[in-house]
Image (spheres, grey):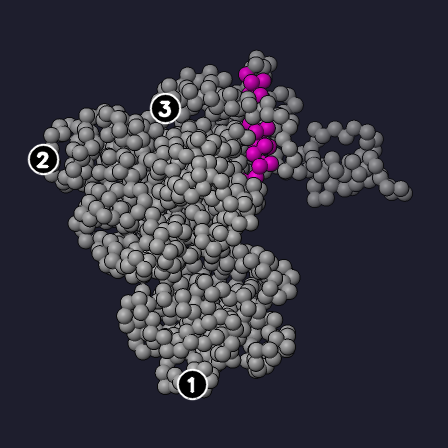
Amino acid sequence: MAERKGTTKVDFLKKIEKEIQQKWDTEKVFEVNASNLEKQTSKDKYFVTFPYPYMNGRLHLGHTFSLSKCEFAVGYQRLKGKTCLYPFGLHCTGMPIKACADKLKREIELYGCPPDFPDEEEEEEEINAKTEDIILKDKAKGKKSKASAKTGSSKYQWDIMKSLGLSDEEIVKFSEAEHWLEYFPPLAIQDLKRMGLKVDWRRSFITTDVNPYYDSFVRWQFLTLRERNKIKFGKRYTIYSPKDGQPCMDHDRQTGEGVGPQEYTLIKLKVLEPYPCKLSGLKGKNVFLVAATLRPETMFGQTNCWVHPEIKYIGFETVNGDIFICTPRAARNMSYQGFTKDNGVVPVVKELMGEEILGASLSAPLTSYKVIYVLPMLTIKEDKGTGVVTSVPSDSPDDFAAFRDLKKKQALRAKYGIRDDMVLPFEPVPIIEIPGFGKLSAVTMCDELKVQSQNDREKLAEAKEKLYLKGFYDGIMLVDGFEGQKVQDVKKSIRNRMIDTGDAYAYMEPEKQVMSRSSDECVVALCDQWYLDYGEEKWKEQTCQCLKNLETFCEETRRNFEATLDWLQEHACSRTYGLGTRLPWDEQWLIESLSDSTIYMAFYTAAHLLQGGDIRGQAESPLGIRPQQMTKEVWDYIFFKEAPFPKTQIPKEKLDQLKQEFEFWYPVDLRVSGKDLIPNHLSYFLYNHVAMWPEESDKWPVAVRANGHLLLNSEKMSKSTGNFLTLTEALDKYSADGMRLALADAGDTVEDANFVEAMADAGVLRLYTWVEWVKEMVANWDSLRSGPANTFNDRVFASEMNAGIIKTDQNYEKMMFKEALKTGFFEFQAAKDKYRELAIEGMHRDLVFRFIEVQTLLLAPFCPHLCEHIWTLLGKPDSIMNASWPVAGPVDESLIRSSQYLMEVAHDLRLRLKNYMTPAKGKVKSFFLKGHSLKGIDQITFNGIENKDNFH
């Protein structure tokens, strides 16, 4: 976009924001205690929460978009008379912070301080061979894309910290994990305060055992879950070093910090007799080529199987006597997952090159072709998957490009001994319809991007990026048994069906290469771990009941929840490395980041009375309660209605104060999050509330609002391309209210939203113009018309204001904020502009100031600072934060329609008058008012027209 011209208007808004934030802080507008609300009941409260962001960097615009939904909802509900609580925590649990700190420490040890890294060419070669960079993200907070699961970054951790604007002296401090917890949380709070969040900051906290009160709370939660048989111990998939004979957690790794297990579906492709010569010695045995796929739902479209002619494969005997053919690396992984008789032992029965099984005939599950063939693909990698790839050219651009190469190039077929009948009769099978891409999406995309061959890697990567996510969320199945259903809803059930029928297995391998400190390439192994048994029937049943009563605002969100609850079984809740709370009964384990973040909303209700406003819980408690006094029995008394008073030195009235806070604020009335957290965090959120309060459904969550990802100027946000904004950058660039206005306009649905910088700039101008007009009206109060407000235009304007109040109220209630902005600001301003233009007798004072007051209230949830400022200009004695939603008067729809009709007629007349005054050569000066009569427009003056007979 063009360079911005000056910042006068932004600076004006920022100055107002700073003054208003100081006013709110002084008046403690957003601080609220249940003990001061005796006259109110829980029906009058509104408790809103947002998933606490991870503290390994500054907050960015993606975080801001999601949390703005909470912010707007709180602003609206305050106006509707609710007592609102919006607390905000900060997450530090998990591996990323510790892994980044340790990586930084190793770089300093290896390359000095500041480090002298190898030059770029040498660095790239070394990193490609040995190092996978840590992703600055809590990996448990959502699934990685297929692309990111297969590639790594080549930046050093030091360089990443440098890119944050830190000096060498500052970076050194980040080699200690503790420093991350000291550095980033205060910056997050600072940025969020600048945004004007309506948060009670006394209740904020950071997680991990650094905060002893929160640590005690999480220990209580897990002791309760174990007591109720929700936590079990058994084999779970984990990264494992065969050489060391133990799980290889991040601190044990030479490379691959932050890498976890990647789940595949292992498809069994049965080799049909007669076997190829190389396999003839296996006659009488069941022999299978095994292909690892991330897309089991596409198996209906298999046309062939790919192997690389020059890769080495092995055949090994499985525990049930079948022979599996794959790469040695994949077989090694399988041997630690129960595929072989002896753990870690691969009983090899055959070694072969890929070219030796080309042309073999196979029977594949689900496909409509009875026999398919093994064909050559030259782009298969030996270090990912099994080296065997099942081919679905209808939906995979890679498969289609390679398949088309073989079809078109007879010489290529001849080179590898592939007969025509193994390729030419086969065509892509329509199995999934994707909006915009049709029923053969890979074919469509390859044609659109002009992909020439399987070696056209960049275009094929682009094609996959466009298709795969769209296919998962919007793809509709076309095959029998699943016809009409969304891919995301049936993916798991298709996979489970194949596993149940013996056509497939669950298979895991590391997302990327992991090397232990003993220089051993790690595998995924089934190891003993503590896990939450989300598949337990009664627990799942109760959670489904919770979902049934949950407001989701969108049917797609509900379907995503239902699909998750259908497949969710177990979740490992423990790790041996990272930051967090230790399992109280087995302290070698840490509680992982998706498990200590499910019911912490309950902790918000008591946090301010325990922590004394210190996010680390190190200050003196306002109630004089010490962390070590917070035993399981004490927490039971606070959170469980029927729990007896515990044996404790804490006075009863103090515990009753904590209990009162919880009883008043619970349940959570609204939780807002990105839709990518539905399959994990948000589902666990429901499960754990049901587990902790099984007999008190009035403590279960009331509503969850999921939103899509945020694009920036219609493009994906990316640091590498520069299309990226942190929260602090957006505040500097557009002011808080300017940014908030653009966030409200970005989008309402679960589809991706779009923050448009041009809109943010335009919004700043609109807000500046609006406040200047208000100042003008206040100054000219005496000159505005008074007396009866009963002209046609007065009555129309009054009705349009009332209609705007009603529509905007409905949009806010449904959390349709883009629509609320449209009806409550854009259309509302347009009604005022029309009134100003048409009221030739002058605008009426009462209507003008009614408009200013109503407009200020309707806009206040979006732009609270400016609206507070205008509220002061209007001479209001109290804060707009304590104001009420405007009362709508009567709406005369016929009057509004009449006005609209006259506007249309006048517009039509102006156009025709313009044409009349400048006719084409030889044309008679006459014009028509199509579909209109002159009745009712007698007041229009026809200047310059001498003869009305020219009207027809």
Task: Tell me the CA gap for discs 3 and 1.
Answer: 81 Å
Q: Badges 2 and 3: C-beta atoms under 8 Å apart?
A: no
Q: What residue appears at the point 50 percent right and 17 percent down from the top-left corner?
A: 873
Q: Range of the magenta residues? A: 752-778
List the residue tagged with mark 3: 29
Which mark lies nearer to you, 2 or 1? 1
Where is residue 127? Give x, y as percent: 48, 51
Q: What residue appears at the point 55 percent right and 16 percent down from the top-left corner?
A: 778
List the residue tagged with mark 1: 280
What is the number of the mark on residue 520? none
Q: Which amino acid does label 2 sit on?
A: Lys
- Res. 399 in view: yes
- Res. 892 in view: no
User: Please, what secondary structure does the residue beneath circle 1 have?
Assistant: helix
Q: In this view, does 903 lie above or below 373?
A: above
Quarter of image, res 82:
top left
Which mark lies nearer to you, 3 or 1? 1
Q: What residue appears at the point 36 percent right and 75 percent down from the top-left corner?
A: 348
Q: 662 left or right of 57?
A: left
**Furthest-left residue in view?**
647
Q: What residue type is labelled 3?
A: Val
Task: Tell me the CA gap for discs 2 and 3.
Answer: 37 Å
Q: Is 55 or 160 nearer to us in this picture?
A: 160
List the residue tagged with mark 2: 647
Which mark lies nearer to you, 2 or 3? 2
Quarter of image, res 503:
bottom left
